[in-house]
Amino acid sequence: MKDFFSHTYGIKFIPFSNLHIFLIILTVLPVLYIYFSQNKLKNHTSKKYMAKIFAFILLLNQFIFTVGYIWSGHFDIARDLPLHYCYVTGYLYIYMLLFNKKNMYNWLYYSVFMCTTASIIWMDIGNSYDRFIFYKFFLGHSGLFIMNIYCFYILNYPVNKTGALIAWVYSNILFIVMYIYNNIFNTNYIMSKTLPAFIYDTYPWVKIIDQPIVWLELAGLLILLISYIPVYYKNR
């Protein structure tokens, strides 16, 4: 059980493997269901409880991870604090859901797109289904992405193009803060120092500009543009 709550390798997760493709499909299918079943879901009695259920799932996911890793003696403050972009954004999302702060969704919608989309496609878990980190990662990224789509289409939280600018500013402020933190404590939260090793192996040309901020900015801006497409058509 202690190995289950650890970073020590058991079955290694391989990016773009059959398992990875399966997880992507497992993310896309609920999104398609939400989109094509909007009328049904909007009229379902569970709709009024879903925001709180979503928040509880995200909180429980982080709670089990933290308690499990502390109990097993594998909690490492150099990488296990909730200071990664998706987890900081996830906690803000939980706050929004619990306290019905719908105005925050205008920029959190885009922020969730930026952090989860990149993480789902370029998944860097390390460990596979025999370690809890595998499930934590899936819920914290794919789960958050699905919740975001549900809030957008079913709960009808408001979003406009101004939110994209706020999300971009928020992301850069968070990056700067964590860049300073990483230099003080010699950590690599939000990948401010280096990108995952498999990125360099898969895309060796990335080393031509070996500055993570450049690639993070480019990927973030591209995802911002893509995430605005549903907003544009919905707000028409």
Image: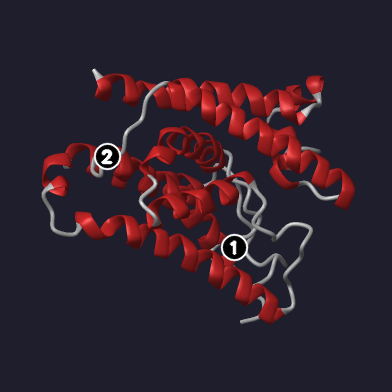
**What's the residue at 16%, 42% (across, down)?**
37
Picture quarter containing residue 57?
bottom left
Q: Which residue is mark 2?
A: 32
The N terminus lies in quadrant: bottom right
Q: Amino acid at mark 2?
A: Leu
Instruction: Say which of 103 and 44 sits in front.
Output: 103
Please tell me how crowded label 1 is: few (under 14), some (14-19), or many (20+) other residues with Cα within 10 Å.
Answer: many
Numbered badge on residue 85: none
Say which residue appears at 46% left-offset and 54% top-offset: 95
Q: Quadrant of residue 190?
A: top right
Q: In the rendered image of this protein, does residue 129 appear above or below residue 160?
A: below
Residue 192 at x, y percent in the picture = 76, 37
Q: Quadrant of the C terminus?
A: top left
Report helix, strand or loop for mark 1: helix
Question: Could you say where residue 230 lies in the image, as x and y percent from the top left?
Answer: 32, 26
> In the shown orientation, is residue 120 left or right of residue 75?
left
Depicted 158 relative to depicted 144: above or below: above
The residue wearing badge 1 is 133
Callout 2: 10 Å neighbours few (<14), some, many (20+)?
few
Q: Label 1 sits on what residue type?
A: Ile
Compared with residue 160, is residue 24 higher up or lower down, i.e. above or below? below
Give the CA distance from mark 1 to mark 2. 26 Å
Residue at (72% x, 23% y) in the render? 214
Q: Secondary structure at mark 2?
A: helix
